Amino acid sequence: MRSPKTKTVMHKILFLCILFLLLVVEVIVGQKRIYNTARITTDPPRIDGIFDEEAWNIVEWNSNFIQHEPHAEQPASEDTRFKIVYDDNNIYFAIQCFDSSPDSIVKRMSRRDGFDGDLVGIAIDSYHDLRTGFTFAVSASGVKTDEIVIDNESSDNSWDPIWYCKTNINDQGWTAEIRIPFTQLRFGKQNEYIWGLQIGRILFRKQETTLWQFISPTAAGWVSYFGELHGIRNINPQKQRDIIPYVAGGYESYQRDPENPFADGRDVFGNIGLDAKWGLSNDFTLDLTINPDFGQVEADPSEVNLTTFETKFDEKRPFFIEGKNILNFRLTPGGGPLSSDNLFYSRRIGKSPSYYSDLEDNEFEDRPTNTTILGAFKITGKTKKGWSAGLMESITQKEISTIDLNGERREIVVEPFTNYFATRIQKDFNNSNTRIGAMVTATNRNLSEPYLEDNIHKAAYTGGIDFNHQWKDKTYYFNFNTAFSNVLGTKKAIYETQTSAPHFFQRTDAKHLSVDSTRTNLSGISGTIQHGKAGNGKWMYTIWLTWRSPGFNSNDIGYLRRNDEIQEIVWVGFRQREPFSIFRNFNLNINQWYGMTFGPEKRYFGGNFNAHWTFKNYWAMGGGVSRESKFISTETLRGGPALMYDGSWNPWVYLDTDNRKKIQFSVNYQSYVRDHKTGYNHSTNFGIRVQLSDALNISMYPGYSKRYDEIEWVETLDDLEEARYIRGSLNQTTTSMTIRINFNITPDFTIQYYGMPFISAGEYTEFKYIHNPGADDFNNRFMLYSDEQLYYNANEEVYEIDETINGTIDYTFDQPNFNVFDFNSNLVVRWEYLPGSVVYFVWTQNRSETQNMGNFNLGEGIKTLFLDTYPRDVFLIKLSYRFGL
């Protein structure tokens, strides 16, 4: 038993130890750390996860990692240490992750870039521009994750460099041994290099992130706060030179149609092509693809889109994904209805053909599904003087559709030969706190047929400049951009552009708009001014003003949701990142927005309040509510006057269970309810993810929604003496299920399955036409057809309207009910048998059926989809081989 005096001495020693540790942490936190590496003079390390080579003895271990979260600035709960050495061609890392409970190391496997389980990561700013970081991470199970950090904080995980790693689990924890060829980094020629450096570790079971160079969770940026790597001398920048040819073959089966000469029930196809990555200089790299094949790419999710707005789908094709941020020119920052607008949208390249012919009875068409990309290349890079540039060029072939009528065949061009071009350039100043940039795009088409000239733009050009400035340790920022567009074509083509979405210049109530049938081009401008505070504290804010003139149109190579709009948004956010009470973290956001046309006409006015938090048991929850006042829609009547909509409430809430567990659940509910119950949309989505083993997980995400709109669009009849904008009361029910199965036999041999059944039904009643669209009272905006005016002709499936009740049919419109049954699935077996060389086996299935009954019956829908609908199956084998030169 210790004496009181002994206890007092022990307490003093413990206090001094804690004080010393806190002082060490304060010193580490408060300064930029430096690691000094050394050149290998012996044999290089074998990449096996064991550090028993002589090469590792020439440098010392470095450690003292600090928590980034959850307890910022506190020492790591488990020690991590590392060494770095290099030779003429590679840089090597040895990382030891100590763990007091080695049996608790989470060794989950996933596809590349999965970020699952325990892992360590290395980030290198080889440009040393304080904005660009090359990240290489590996999980305890050996799965790679890599990404490029651009603009100091935004990341792009589409980058897949060639590098080597091996992990090993032992009784002290686990290790990672890594070799990164200099060909995978970008840097200019120097005698001695200083690179930005960061080493991080995620301890999955504690959701703890620790860093070698401490960076506050509230910091405004990431790369600019890296530590430094010193000691690399007299190396030559390496130029990556890879050529990757591929060969593919496949078989397609579908339902045979005896009457259709193009549908014999099966097709056999083959393809060859080439990808290449070629270092042009120390700073710039060429990416090239010739006749690319994207058969392994997952299908887009199904939907029923009843609006005039085009759905923006994610890019999934490897060539266009990698380095996508380089050609990014967003017209508006995140948030709001205009946040998707961009001068470049790569899904335009290889899209479905633009022209549709009117088929006669008994005519059949063999129509290409997508436009063939003959070739494309990108040149990207950055110089040590702060210049960064990207250039993309792509050519798509002329697509021909074959039409058969009783054995007589004719061909029509449905998509012209097209050239797409985009280039982006930026320059950093003021220690990377100021940046000026510009972008130009061009789309040029060879319109050899008159019917194409009258329906498609001959050419389209856009350009923009942007300016970004940060100050006070990047806490505050000011952003500005402006862009122009110019589309060219025949008088008819430009007339069609003026009178269709997103323009609708024929609106009779818009005094600032008019249609000019003599025009052969259409131009417009856009712009954004933004100021805000980002990080370095608990409170943040941003305010911006953005605009799109009525003539602005970037949709030939970019994406534009709508124009003729001036929008103002204010956002204030609060971030509590340190645990307190029952919370691990807590976020709060308040938004306000206002929009108007160039008329000016008030479009909308609203606000939002939302909060998100994680409990200390790692469950996450959040919710919010939006309020929108009465607003007008300038596009709903498809060229008619603006239609007034009542105000609305939009509440939502979600709950996610602990993502560390082998079984995880999620649920979210959101609702949209208009005043006076003139419309609503209630949707509920559930999720379950089961980690059956470290190598196998299954997830299912069912969803259900119920929608009602008393004035949903049916048809616009503008060829009458007085246009009729037909509307109806729509009851729509939709259900879907997203299923994913991931099985990782090894980090390089994976099996992935994706499937999504989708069933939606919509039934229209209470047909009406809009006659006073701007009326304040809802019921005064339309006239409801009476039973005497409306007759349904079941044989023709049309509604006949006798508006004057004089026994004569004044006009008709089609019965608009719909049933959509859709199923898309992909099974992809992927084996990277050598770094950069891959074998794919792919099975894709699609089932698609449409009907016009309108009633929703889940059981009958499943029967229709899986028993009554014939599948279209595609089996594909693709082999690529990387030649590193």
Image (spheres, rainbow, N blue to C red):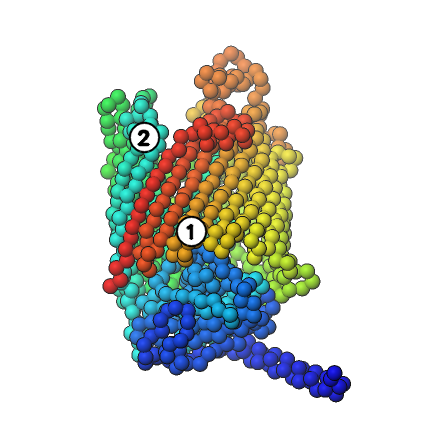
Q: Which residue type carries mark 2?
A: Gly
213 or 244: nearer the viewer: 244
Number of numbered callouts drawn: 2
Q: Which residue type carries mark 1?
A: Asn
Residue 15 visible at all: yes
| Nearer to us: label 1 or label 2 | 2
Relative image position of residue 436 (x, y in whole percent): 40, 64
Q: Secondary structure at mark 1?
A: loop
Q: Secondary structure at mark 2?
A: loop
Q: Which residue lies at the image location 39% right of the left edge and 61% below the top edge?
A: 437
Relative image position of residue 260 (x, y in whole percent): 31, 25
Q: CA distance from mark 1 to mark 2?
A: 41 Å
Numbered badge on residue 265: 2
Residue 68 visible at all: no
| Residue farthest right in this picture | 4
Q: Residues within 10 Å of mark 2 (few under 14, many from 20)?
A: few
422 or 130: nearer the viewer: 130
Q: Which residue lies at the image location 73% right of the left edge and 84% below the top edge?
A: 2
Relative image position of residue 151 (x, y in whole percent): 44, 64
Numbered badge on residue 361: none
732 or 726: nearer the viewer: 732
Q: Quadrant of residue 263?
A: top left
Query: Considering the image in quadrants, where does the N terminus appear?
Result: bottom right
Residue carrying label 1: 342
